Amino acid sequence: MAPQSHDQVAAVTSVNSIATGATADSMARQHPQPKSNLGRKRPQFGLWSVVVVCALYFLFPLWAIAKFTLDLPLEGWTFKAYTKAVQEPELHTTLWLSLRITGGTVALSLALMIWTVLWTTLKVKRMQPVVEFISILPYMVPPIAFVVGIAGVFRPAFPSFIANPYSLIFFYTVLAMPFTYRSLDAGLRAIDVKTLTEASRGLGAGWMTTIMRVVVPNLRSALLGATFLTVAVVLGEYTIASLLLINTFPIFLATYNSKEIFAGPALGLMSMLAVAVLFALLGLFTRKRGGANATAAIA
Amino acid sequence: MSALELSAVRKTFAGTAALEHLDLSLGDGELVCLLGPSGCGKTTALRIVAGFEVPDTGSVLLGGADITRKPANKRNMGMVFQAYSLFPNLTAEENVAFGLRLRKQSGEQRRKRVAEMLDLVGLSPQAKRYAQQMSGGQQQRVALARALAIQPEVLLLDEPLSALDAKVRVNLRDEIRRIQLETGTTTLFVTHDQEEALAVSDRVGVMSNGRLEQIGNPTAVYQDPSSSFVARFVGTVNELPGTVRSDGRSVEVGGTAIPAKGVEHFGPGDAVQVLVRPEGLLVEHGNGNGNEGLAGTVVTAAFQGSTIRVKVRLDSTDTLVDADAAADSIIQPNPGDRVTVKIVAQRAFVESAKEPASV
């Protein structure tokens, strides 16, 4: 296969870095971009075909929703459906609740996982396969089984806990575990964390200082990746919240969608675009860092 | 009182001993190299001193105080690692300032010390650069500046040159020694490179299988090894089979009497190995007199700058020996030449002959 062009390589690197959380600069070091070759710059037909088909597959439904919600019968092109949706009072309360739950989930996930991944990488390497297995359990257990288990255990024992919307933080932390673990693990593998932590401790830093000043700054991309994936999980989770009777944003979205023929899909499209913008920002951020480092390395 | 002292230190990993009863002391301002092959325990010893490992038994004393179980971050030791260890998110000057910041030095003091340290390693112009903008040699220089900035009680160098190319390695090696002498920092240097160890150390400790085989100044270790392991590991050594003569003072090798150190520990007729370094052999053209040297044929002659390393197959023992001939001598040895190899008096030493391999 002919080598990919610079843009293609950059795009692939960017997508991979979101998925794995590996830092763009470390990836740039490991996979230096091929030198420019005018003869090889022609786009490959096969590759572009896949890109076009995928783009159509994903973008056509979005275009259809946009057309459906913007081009209203008898009224023509208008933003009425969107303005109606954003003025809905319940949207604000549910969205605010979901954002608080999201913040809590991100904080708890990262706080737990940074220590866990660091500890398994540095101190108890033999536990890595075990933790890795545990981290993928939420993939394997269907959310419906998960919530039935939760309700069965917590409702009789701690009824006030399960009725509290913030109990979702703990359950969503479990759901987000596959993403946070993998992202942080990939980020830690991309740096020589053992040497860096030892260097830091040798200079007089305690564990907390080492993590805050050395580990976290060098895991910025991985942390961002983990954060955005957690946000996407929480803002899209329906089953658990629904069965625990907690009115979060996804629950409101589903209900609103069933009763508002135009404003419902409009709100759905807006929330989808908001998540897409988050990912695009992450992509831009990681690519910018990689580019800056590559330029610096040349200088 | 020693600046640093390891006493009867033992360390095992999963039942395998990495260190066995290690005793080592470093004087104030001294640079001691621990030299040995991979897995000999030298890095474990260094990591125990740094506080990254805790010994099973034994103690580590720093200025007379027991620090065996003191955490690494409370020991005030500077360390330069084999792998590049600069914090990638910080510039060179921020890396050097890292330890000073932890010691709550004022901004002015910090800036002054960072400038001093970067100047010491010759990297002031690179102060604003990140690790990925510097070469490997520059990164290790900054790591050295960072380690020295905190005015450590002991500087620990864990094979800091092994990832560098040959020329940079030699330059940085000399620079480390210059800086160490300038700052007077007590230093423990771990390496597997004998040339590096001999070049920079006040004393060299040769390690094998978790034990310190010999420790002494570089000349003594090279010229008067205490064991065949040390002789073989430090420098090149030729091994010739021989028998202790009836006079008890020399060894007979291929019909030639050779005076050798250590022969007094053996009795007449004992089978021994004669160990002699290439510079302890003289190569002369021609077959010579059988009593004065060992006749042989030149197999290869490799030019090495000031000397020519000549490989000779000896007729009497059918062994290959390496000898150094001056590169500027009038007659140059060539493959196929008949030569006589003579052993310089007191440059050979003996050990007991190896047990024959079981069949």
Image (spheres, grey):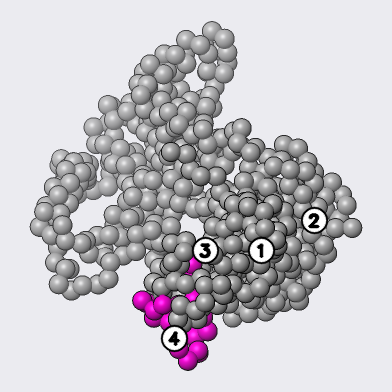
**In terms of sequence position, does the residue under pointer 2 or pointer 3 come before the other?**
2
Quarter of the image holding residue A60? top left
Viewer-proximal residue, A119 or B213? B213
Q: Is residue B261 left or right of residue B132?
A: right
Residue B35 shows in the view: no
> Which of marks 2 and 4 precedes in the sequence?
2
Number of marks drawn? 4
Q: Which residues are magenta?
A: B320-340
The crowding category of the residue bearing disc 3, from other C-alpha atoms within 10 Å (few below 14, some 14 to 19, many at least 20), is many
Q: Quadrant of residue B231?
A: bottom right
- On residue B332, which mark appears? 4
Q: Label 4 vs label 2: CA separation? A: 47 Å
Residue tagged by mark 3? Answer: B254
- Mark 1: few, some, or many residues within 10 Å (few <14, many ≥20)? many
Give, as a three-letter code, the residue at label 1. Ser
- Tags 4 and 2 in contact by the CB under 8 Å rule? no
Helix, strand or loop for disc 4 = loop
Whole-number angstrom distance, CA of label 3 to CA of label 4: 25 Å
Q: Chain of mark 3?
A: B
Is residue B322 a member of the stretch shown in magenta? yes
Could you say whether the residue bearing mark 3 is in a helix, strand or loop?
loop
Which residue lies under the disc numbered 1?
B250
- Are discs 4 and 2 both within one chain? yes
In which chain is the residue bearing label 1?
Answer: B
Q: Residue at x 50, y 89 (%)?
A: B329
Helix, strand or loop status at disc 2: strand
Say whether marks 3 and 4 touch (CB < 8 Å): no
Q: Are marks 2 and 1 on the same chain?
A: yes
Establish whether labels 1 and 4 are both on one chain: yes
| Label at residue B25 | 2
Q: Residues within 10 Å of mark 2 (few under 14, many from 20)?
A: some
Q: Are marks 2 and 3 in contact (CB under 8 Å)?
A: no
